[in-house]
Amino acid sequence: MVTTNKHQKRTKGRRKIEIKPIEAKSNLQVTFSKRRAGLVKKASELSLLSGAQVAVIAFSPGKKVFAFGHPNVETVLDRYLNEGFDTKEEDPMNNLSNNPSIQQWNREYEEAVRELEEEKKCLAMIQEWNKMRESDLNSGFWWDDCVDDMGVEELEEYVRAMKELRKNVGIKANELMMANQNIGNALGSFGFGDEPF
């Protein structure tokens, strides 16, 4: 009696590839981008785990230069070319805060944190508003009550409440428009693209 395996493998799975130059031009940039990201990640991990000073410079097939260094590329290259530290600069880690690019990154980080806090406030307002809407939907709206059975005092209170509701709706609409505008401004301030780092 012959039995067949019901669970046959349909794909070839993960296999080791032969390391050789890629000839298809369309695959070159994709492979470069993926491998570059992995290389930078490994260099960053090495630097973080061992405290080593690391520099990686790569030229893409499109002739762009990509560099990564810790504490920075210039410091590592200077140290390599001078075979050690300068006498005036014993520890390059002390000069990190004076590096203009790091100062710019810190400013961008602080701005992003501020924008994140604003977005959290907007989200909290929207969630609160949604909760109020849900509770109103579950209990029914007071303005849907029949006014035919109301007395004069109840009608006057009803009119005051409607005016208050109109004012609150206007305020909430302005808040939502401002929040929406802030979100649009925040999204517009972030640029996306494949830029060298």
Image (cartoon, grey):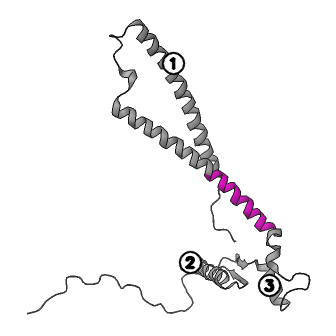
Relative image position of residue 43 (x, y in whole percent): 65, 82
- Would residue 105 be counted in the magenta stretch? yes
Give me the residue at 73% from left, 84% from top.
Answer: 53
Distance (Cα) linking label 1 and label 2: 60 Å
Q: Nearer the viewer, mark 2 or mark 3?
A: 3
Q: Nearer the viewer, mark 1 or mark 3?
A: 1
Neighbor class of circle 1 (other Cα within 10 Å; few <14, some 14-19, many 20+) is few
Relative image position of residue 119 (x, y in whole percent): 59, 48
- Mark 1 near mark 3, Cβ–Cβ under 8 Å? no
Instruction: Name the kind of residue labelled 3 in the image.
Output: Leu
Q: Is residue 184 left or right of residue 63?
A: left
Relative image position of residue 98 (x, y in whole percent): 83, 69
Q: Nearer the viewer, mark 1 or mark 2?
A: 1
Distance (Cα) linking label 2 and label 3: 25 Å
Determine the residue located farthest toward the front in the rendered image: 153
Instruction: Name the kind of residue labelled 1 in the image.
Output: Lys
Relative image position of residue 80 (x, y in whole percent): 80, 89
Give me the residue at 62% from left, 47% from top.
Answer: 118
Name the residue carrying label 1.
Answer: 163
- Mark 1 near mark 2, Cβ–Cβ under 8 Å? no
Neighbor class of circle 3 (other Cα within 10 Å; few <14, some 14-19, many 20+) is some
Residue extent of the magenta highlight: 99-116
The correct choice, above or below, for 63 with respect to 161 in the image is: below
**Disc 2 element:** helix
Q: 24 or 86, which lies in front? A: 86
Q: Which label is found at residue 77? A: 3
Instruction: Name the kind of residue labelled 2 in the image.
Output: Lys
**Disc 3 element:** helix
Determine the residue located farthest toward the left in the rendered image: 1
